[in-house]
Image (cartoon, rainbow, N blue to C red):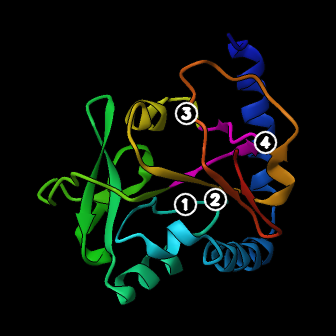
Amino acid sequence: MSNPVEKSRLRKQMLDARDELSLDFIKIASNRIRDNLRKIDFYRQAKSIGTYYSIGSEVQTHDLLHEFFNQGKEVSLPRVDKNDLVFKKISSLSDLELGNFSVMEPKEKCETTKKLDVIIVPAIALTREGYRLGYGFGFYDRYLQGKKIKKIGLTYSKHVLKSFPHDDHDVKMDCVVTEDSVIHIK
């Protein structure tokens, strides 16, 4: 069992460091991350992809969304419903509205996704073993628990840490993608 205070302190430290990154670095690194994603077979072959709409210093996903639309992939984004995530299909950015936590999310009328081949998960930090430090609300861990979805965590290379506290309910990623590498988790 991890120490919640230690995890919270690390989360703040990593968010502060990420928020200090320049906009130029974020754009360049996000483009390289997008290039590295294309090296993953199961990602390229996916018909249905869940992803997030990036905000702030997160790895940018706006160009990815346009790429998915142009490729004819089924695109789903998360929407917070009570205390859980649901993924809803979108066909364009006009299907989004400002939701919880000031994040763009699918409008309620959008169809709920039944199956995702791949999910791209936001992360504050990741380990080479696939553990993810998220925002501390547990939404993704609860959503992913027991699902057979290929999980890809995106982060900047300086946010791949040797280790950090994790719990039994923390869902590991299948791949960690940075601007410098693709790490396949065994």
- From the image, tell me which residue sits under label 2: 58
Q: Amino acid at mark 1?
A: Ile
Q: Amino acid at mark 3?
A: Val
> Which of pointers 3 and 2 lies earlier in the amino acid sequence?
2
Residue 119 as seen in the image, left or right of residue 78: right
> Which of pointers 4 and 1 lies earlier in the amino acid sequence?
4
- From the image, tell me which residue sits under label 4: 14
- From the image, tell me which residue sits under label 1: 55
- Report, in whole angstroms, how far the alpha carbon at label 4 lies from the one at label 3: 20 Å
Label 3 vs label 1, nearer the camera: 3
- Report, in whole angstroms, how far the alpha carbon at label 4 lies from the one at label 1: 16 Å
Residue 6 as seen in the image, left or right of residue 68: right
Residue ranking furthest to the left = 109
Q: Amino acid at mark 2?
A: Glu
> Which of pointers 4 and 3 lies earlier in the amino acid sequence?
4
- From the image, tell me which residue sits under label 3: 171
> Which of pointers 3 and 1 lies earlier in the amino acid sequence?
1
